[in-house]
C-alpha cells in the first residue's frame, strides 16, 4: 500500500503515443501501487485515464490530494471492465490503448517493451504482458484457449518457462494489454455483454484474429498482478461459467479446432503454442558461441530454441527472447518440454555436444543433425551464418546420426534384428529403452516394438546360455561324483 501522504505525479503529454486506461472502483490501496509504478515509466509518451466506476466520494478527495497528471472519467455507476474501457477509448488521445487493471503494478520498461513489440510486428493488433504474482511466480506468458473456451496461462505457477519468448498467442489477458486504437475500433471495442468482467478479452482477441490480425506476447513487458483481488470466488466462478457459455455459442467453429483441455500435458501445450504461431519449423541450437550471429531470428523463419549448456548467452536472454528465441533451462524445466516439440533439426556448434547419449538421440526423433563447424555435414567451415545453416535444413544433407559410447548406432527403424545381431547393439538398444519416458514410449511404438523384439532375443540368448551352462555344470558334477 502506498504512503497516503506521498504525492504521485504522472508525466503529462499533449500528444501521447499511448493512453493507459485503468478502470477502478476506487480501491486506493490497489490503485496507488499501479500509479506509482506508472510514474516511473520511461520512454514513449503516454497519458493515464482513470475510469472511476461508481467510486466512493472519498476516492475523489484522495485523488485531489495525492495524484496529479491523470485524467479522470467519472461514472456514477459501475460500467464494468468492458464498458469502462470503451468509454475511455472514445476520450483517449493515444494511437495505442493500454488496458491496465488497478491491481496490476508494471515494472520499469513495461510500456516501452509493449510499444517495441507492436513496432516489430506490424500484423499484430495487440501485445500482452508477462504477468506474474507478487512473489514472482508466473501467471501467464500469453495464454492457451481450449476447446471448451477455458483458458490456461502459459507457464502458470512456475518460476520460469521454456515458452518465455515473443510469439503470437491465442489471447493475452486484458489486465495489461496494449492494442492499436484503430484495431480496437475496427472490431467494435469490448463486448459489454460480458458485464461486469471476465472473458471480454478472450472475445476481443478472437474477433481481432478473425480479421487476420495477431496477438503477441512480449516477455520484457513485466507486470505484477494481484490476481482475483477484484472479485469474490463464488461470483467469479459464476461469471466465468456464464461467459464461457457465451463464447462457446459464439465461437463454436473456432473453438472446435482447438485441443481438449489439458493444461498439465506438455504435448498439448506444445501443440497449442505451435498452432498459435502457425506451426513453424523449430530448430534446436546446442551450445552456441557467445558471439553467435542471430540476425535471422527476428520473428521470421523457423523457431530457434537455444540449449545453452555452457551459459554463454544467458546475459542476452531477455533481449533475444523479445526477438522470438526460446531458451531451455534444464535447471527449471523438465526435458519433457523438449520431447514435446516438433523439431525440424538440431544444430551443434561443437563436436563434443553432438555426441548425444542414446536417450538424447531419440529425443530428436531421427532429425537432421548438423555440426556448424563443418566437421559433419555439408556446411562451410568458416564461421557459417544462420542463413547458411538453415538453407540446409530442408535439403537432404547429412543423414541422421547418433553415437553410443563413441560407436555408430544403426537406425532403430532399419532391418529387423535377427538372432545373430551384434551383442553390443543389443546392449545399446536396451540402454535406450531404459531411458524412455512414458510419453516417449507412446510416441515411438514402432521403435519400442523393435526394442522389445531385441530384448526378447537377448533373453532367449541368455536362456540358451543358461541351459548350456547348466548342462556343463551337471556334467562337471557328474564327473566329480564319479
Image: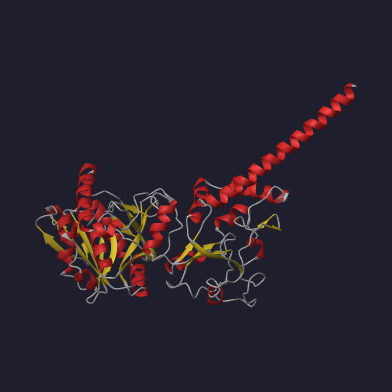
Question: Looking at the rendering, which quadrant does residue 121 occupy?
Answer: bottom left
- Looking at the picture, tell me which residue is in the foreground, 185 or 176: 185
Number of numbered labels in the structure image: 0
- Looking at the picture, tell me which residue is in the foreground, 329 or 412: 412
Left or right: where 312 falls relative to 32: right
Q: How is the image coloured?
A: secondary structure
Q: Is residue 300 visible?
A: yes
Quarter the C terminus occupies: top right
User: Which residue is located at x 38 percent, y 55 percent?
Assistant: 154
- Identify whether 239 is placed above or below 414: above
Left or right: where 345 falls relative to 8: right
- Where in the figure is residue 225, as x and y percent of width and height? 32, 54
Question: Looking at the rendering, which quadrant does residue 40 occupy?
Answer: bottom left
Q: Is residue 101 visible?
A: no
- Looking at the picture, tell me which residue is in the foreground, 159 or 54: 159
User: Which residue is located at x 22 percent, y 67 percent?
Assistant: 69
- Where in the figure is residue 315, as x and y percent of width and height? 52, 64
Residue extending farthest right: 482
- Where in the figure is residue 182, as x and y percent of width and height? 22, 73
User: Which residue is located at x 64 percent, y 78 percent?
Assistant: 382
Amino acid at each position: 500500500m502506498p504512503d497516503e501522504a506521498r504525492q504521485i505525479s504522472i508525466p503529462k503529454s499533449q500528444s501521447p503515443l499511448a493512453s493507459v486506461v485503468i478502470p477502478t472502483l476506487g480501491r486506493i490501496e490497489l490503485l496507488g501501487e499501479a500509479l506509482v509504478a506508472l510514474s516511473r515509466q520511461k520512454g514513449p509518451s503516454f497519458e493515464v485515464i482513470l475510469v472511476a466506476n461508481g467510486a466512493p466520494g472519498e476516492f475523489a478527495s484522495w485523488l485531489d490530494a495525492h495524484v496529479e497528471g491523470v485524467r479522470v472519467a467519472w461514472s456514477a455507476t459501475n460500467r464494468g471492465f468492458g464498458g469502462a474501457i470503451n468509454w475511455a477509448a472514445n476520450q483517449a488521445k493515444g494511437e495505442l490503448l493500454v488496458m491496465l487493471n488497478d491491481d496490476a503494478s508494471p515494472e520499469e520498461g513495461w510500456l516501452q517493451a509493449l510499444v517495441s513489440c507492436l513496432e516489430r510486428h506490424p500484423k499484430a493488433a495487440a501485445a500482452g504482458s508477462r504477468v506474474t504474482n507478487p512473489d514472482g511466480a508466473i501467471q501467464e506468458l500469453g495464454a492457451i484457449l481450449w476447446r471448451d473456451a477455458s483458458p490456461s496461462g502459459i507457464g502458470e505457477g512456475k518460476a520460469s518457462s521454456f515458452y518465455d519468448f515473443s510469439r503470437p498467442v491465442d489471447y493475452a489477458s486484458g489486465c495489461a494489454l496494449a492494442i492499436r486504437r484503430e484495431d480496437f475500433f475496427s472490431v467494435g471495442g469490448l463486448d459489454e455483454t460480458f458485464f461486469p468482467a471476465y472473458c471480454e478479452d478472450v472475445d476481443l482477441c478472437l474477433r481481432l484474429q478473425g480479421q487476420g490480425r495477431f496477438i503477441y506476447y512480449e516477455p520484457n513487458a513485466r507486470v505484477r498482478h494481484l490476481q482475483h483481488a477484484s472479485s469474490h470466488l463464488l461470483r467469479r466462478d459464476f461469471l466465468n461459467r456464464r461467459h464461457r457459455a457465451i463464447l462457446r455459442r459464439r465461437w463454436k467453429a473456432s473453438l472446435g479446432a482447438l485441443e481438449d483441455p489439458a493444461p498439465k500435458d506438455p504435448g498439448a501445450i506444445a501443440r497449442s503454442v505451435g498452432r498459435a504461431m502457425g506451426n513453424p519449423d523449430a530448430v534446436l541450437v546446442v551450445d552456441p558461441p557467445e558471439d553467435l550471429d542471430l540476425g535471422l531470428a527476428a520473428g521470421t523463419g523457423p523457431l530457434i530454441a537455444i540449449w545453452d549448456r555452457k551459459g554463454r548467452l544467458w546475459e542476452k536472454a531477455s533481449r533475444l527472447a523479445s526477438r522470438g528465441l526460446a531458451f531451455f533451462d534444464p535447471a527449471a524445466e523438465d526435458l519433457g518440454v523438449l520431447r514435446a516439440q516438433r523439431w525440424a533439426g538440431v544444430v551443434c556448434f561443437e563436436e563434443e555436444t553432438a555426441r548425444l547419449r542414446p536417450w538424447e538421440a531419440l529425443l530428436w526423433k531421427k532429425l537432421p543433425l548438423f555440426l556448424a563447424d563443418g566437421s559433419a555435414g555439408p556446411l562451410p567451415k568458416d564461421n557459417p551464418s544462420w542463413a547458411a545453416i538453415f538453407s540446409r535444413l530442408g535439403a537432404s544433407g547429412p543423414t541422421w546420426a547418433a553415437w553410443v559410447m563413441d560407436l555408430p548406432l544403426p537406425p532403430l527403424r532399419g532391418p529387423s534384428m535377427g538372432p545373430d545381431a551384434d551383442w553390443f547393439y543389443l546392449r545399446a538398444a536396451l540402454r535406450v529403452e531404459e531411458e524412455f519416458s512414458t510419453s516417449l514410449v507412446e510416441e515411438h511404438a514402432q521403435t519400442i516394438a523393435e526394442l522389445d523384439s531385441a530384448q526378447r532375443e537377448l533373453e532367449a540368448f541368455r536362456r540358451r546360455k543358461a541351459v548350456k551352462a547348466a548342462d556343463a555344470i551337471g556334467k562337471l558334477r557328474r564327473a566329480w561324483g564319479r
